[in-house]
């Protein structure tokens, strides 16, 4: 790369701000025609209508999402504490131990940060004052204007309250301007934070004391690179991409497992098919046995038919004999009764009576047999149609049935039941089919996820390159306006970021660790402001905790001027909260600046008194 000293000597002064212009300055801005002088400010002021004046007055500060007030009860070192914030610039001043950082930790905790992210405790319960069972945090947000969140529900203020308890679950409460609890669900809190673009884990939104210390130290290029990723949102994008990669890896492992399962299903299907084919002859035996049983039913019908035929034949014979006796008896009646042998006549009459009785009995038996045959035939017909030809003898069919039963039992003991084998085979085939379909769908989904991963990875790399260029440009512009020149050196392979800066008159470059502590702190402030100028996010407030550590008076004054100038734009869109232990007498007294001085907090510490030399 070119020498920094050469670029510093030949750098043109840059006075314009690079980045997206605030919305208020974009709307209604007019540029006078070439050659025509713009009207004086007084004339423009006279020409402004009262409506425009009211609109300008109304839109001077942000109307939604900024912090109006913070209340703390039994939280860390604060027993009962409250602070009202200005909508633009706030300086919170106090000596070490006065509880400045506790205010930042309270904002983080109330806005769904983990205890570890506050760098004050490992668990939420440790944020409760010692000896107390509970703590309460209230953060009141302004909720007015066009960007208000559900103003019909919450009104002009939204109070986010979080109650901490040592012995029970912690609780969120979202409270309206009138004091009504609207919700206790964390999902509703997430919606509010998302609506106002509040992300307290971003160091450019909320710079904690530990992050500031790491930055001011500036000796670890890896931490500087990680700060760049977090501040630009690239870390969150990278985590999302890593989650997709993990999902892809998990899906690949799942597909490998599915391939193994498919091989098992194929083996089971092959074994089931083999067993199914082996058991096919069992089904043949079963069919033969079923057919034999049906033939036995028809053989029973045949027996009934033979019996009926025999009864009908006997009935016919008896009828003929009865007719013969009747005729003989009639002929004897024509003979002289006197000469008739009375004994013979009685015998013939007796036989005729017996024949009549026999005929009646046979007639009843024939009718009964016919009814039995008809019902049996109907029943058997519903089971099986009447076979053609003559039925085999029932004895033969019974022997055949017994033989088939014994053979079928032997085969079932050896190979199992046919229907069981058939069901197992059908299930194995269906399982294999479903497994193959699941594998096909999984592969399609895997390809889609790989495409998503590839696209997002490429977009992430492009975004990283663009953001590095923009941050570098903004960083150099800020330094140039203060008589410095610098650049950010990114090493993406090693994931390192080095800050190089020199005064404009100096011939050699210097990395931040070679600068004085004051120059280093000023350079880091310029580095942080470079991200703010990008308008990557539109967070309503930004807080910096102990950002001015190690600054000398000269660089502190320069840094304060940079910060106040950045925050005091004609149409400020953000609220700024600066926490400092330094002397704040040099801060200008302006209407858009509010200074909060914290008194020392009595932490109930005990001191050990040592004996003096006199006592000794």
Image: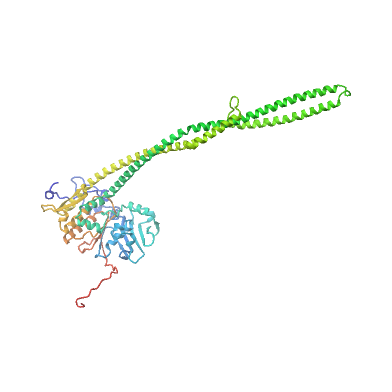
Above/below status of 167 relative to 400: below
Residue 482, horizontal then vertical, whole percent: 16, 54
Nearest the viewer among 269 and 448 is: 269
* Quarter of the figure that contains the C terminus: bottom left
| Residue 249 found in image quarter | top left
At x 72%, y 25%, the residue is: 316
Q: Is residue 40 left or right of residue 106?
A: left
Q: How many marks?
A: 0
Q: Is residue 399 left or right of residue 24?
A: right
| Residue 132 found in image quarter | bottom left
Q: Residue furthest bottom?
A: 614
Above/below status of 483 relative to 362: below
At x 32%, y 43%, the residue is: 248
Residue 74, horizontal then vertical, whole percent: 33, 65
Nearest the viewer among 574 and 464 is: 464
Q: Residue furthest right?
A: 338
At x 25%, y 72%, the residue is: 608
Residue 27, horizontal then vertical, whole percent: 27, 48
Above/below status of 325 relative to 196: above
| Residue 589 found in image quarter | bottom left
Q: Is residue 366 left or right of residue 62?
A: right
At x 74%, y 26%, the residue is: 318
Residue 379, horizontal then vertical, whole percent: 61, 32
Residue 85 showing in the rendered view:
no
Nearest the viewer among 605 and 380 is: 380
Nearest the viewer among 101 and 34 is: 101
């Amino acid at each position: 790369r070119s020498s920094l000293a050469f670029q510093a000597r030949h750098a043109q002064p840059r006075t314009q701000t690079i980045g997206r212009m605030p919305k208020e300055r974009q709307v209604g801005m007019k540029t006078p025609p070439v050659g025509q002088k713009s009207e004086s400010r007084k004339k423009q002021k006279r020409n402004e209508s009262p409506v425009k004046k009211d609109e300008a007055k109304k839109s001077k500060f942000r109307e939604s999402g900024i912090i109006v007030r913070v209340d703390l009860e039994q939280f860390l070192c604060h027993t009962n504490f409250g602070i009202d914030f200005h909508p633009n610039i706030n300086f919170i001043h106090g000596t070490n131990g006065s509880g400045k950082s506790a205010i930042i930790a309270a904002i983080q905790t109330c806005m769904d940060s983990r205890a570890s992210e506050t760098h004050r405790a490992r668990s939420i319960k440790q944020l409760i004052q010692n000896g107390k069972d509970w703590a309460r945090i209230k953060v009141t947000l302004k909720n007015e204007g066009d960007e208000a969140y559900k103003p019909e529900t919450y009104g002009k203020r939204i109070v986010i309250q979080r109650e901490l308890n040592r012995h029970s679950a912690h609780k969120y409460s979202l409270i309206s301007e009138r004091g009504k609890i609207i919700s206790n669900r964390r999902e509703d809190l997430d919606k509010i934070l998302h609506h106002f673009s509040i992300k307290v884990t971003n160091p450019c939104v909320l710079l904690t004391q530990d992050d500031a210390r790491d930055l001011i130290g500036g000796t670890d290029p890896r931490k500087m690179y990680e700060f760049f990723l977090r501040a630009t949102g690239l870390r969150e994008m990278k985590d999302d991409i890593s989650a997709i990669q993990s999902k892809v890896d998990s899906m690949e492992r799942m597909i490998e497992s599915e391939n193994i399962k498919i091989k098992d299903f194929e083996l089971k299907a092959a074994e089931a098919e083999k067993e199914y084919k082996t058991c096919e002859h069992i089904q043949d035996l079963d069919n033969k046995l079923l057919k034999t049983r049906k033939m036995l039913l028809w053989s029973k019908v045949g027996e009934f038919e033979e019996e009926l035929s025999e009864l009908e034949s006997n009935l016919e014979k008896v009828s003929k004999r009865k007719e013969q006796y009747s005729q003989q008896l009639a002929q004897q009646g024509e003979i002289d009764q006197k000469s008739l042998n009375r004994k013979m006549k009685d015998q013939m009459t007796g036989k005729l009576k017996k024949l009549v009785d026999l005929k009646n009995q046979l007639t009843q038996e024939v009718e009964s047999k016919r009814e039995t045959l008809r019902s049996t035939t109907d029943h058997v017909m519903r089971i099986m149609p009447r076979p053609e030809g003559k039925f085999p003898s029932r004895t033969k069919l019974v022997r055949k049935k017994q033989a088939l039963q014994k053979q079928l039992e032997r085969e079932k003991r050896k190979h199992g039941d046919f229907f069981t084998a058939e069901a197992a085979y059908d299930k194995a085939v269906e399982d294999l089919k479903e497994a193959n379909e699941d594998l096909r769908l999984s592969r399609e989904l895997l390809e889609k996820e790989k495409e998503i991963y590839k696209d997002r990875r490429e977009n992430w790399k492009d975004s990283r390159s663009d953001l590095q260029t923009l941050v570098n440009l903004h960083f150099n512009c800020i330094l140039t306006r203060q008589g410095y020149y610098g650049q950010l050196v990114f090493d993406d392979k090693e994931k390192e970021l080095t800050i190089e800066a020199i005064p404009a008159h100096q011939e050699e470059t210097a990395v931040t660790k070679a600068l004085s502590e004051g120059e280093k702190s000023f350079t880091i402030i310029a580095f942080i402001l470079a991200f703010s100028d990008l308008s990557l996010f539109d967070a309503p407030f930004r807080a910096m905790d102990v950002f001015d550590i190690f600054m000398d008076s000269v660089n502190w004054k320069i840094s304060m001027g940079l910060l106040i100038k950045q925050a005091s734009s004609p149409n400020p869109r953000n609220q700024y909260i600066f926490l400092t232990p330094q002397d704040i007498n040099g801060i200008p007294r302006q209407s858009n600046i509010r200074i909060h001085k914290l008194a020392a907090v009595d932490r109930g510490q005990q001191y050990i008194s040592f004996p003096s030399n006199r006592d000794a």
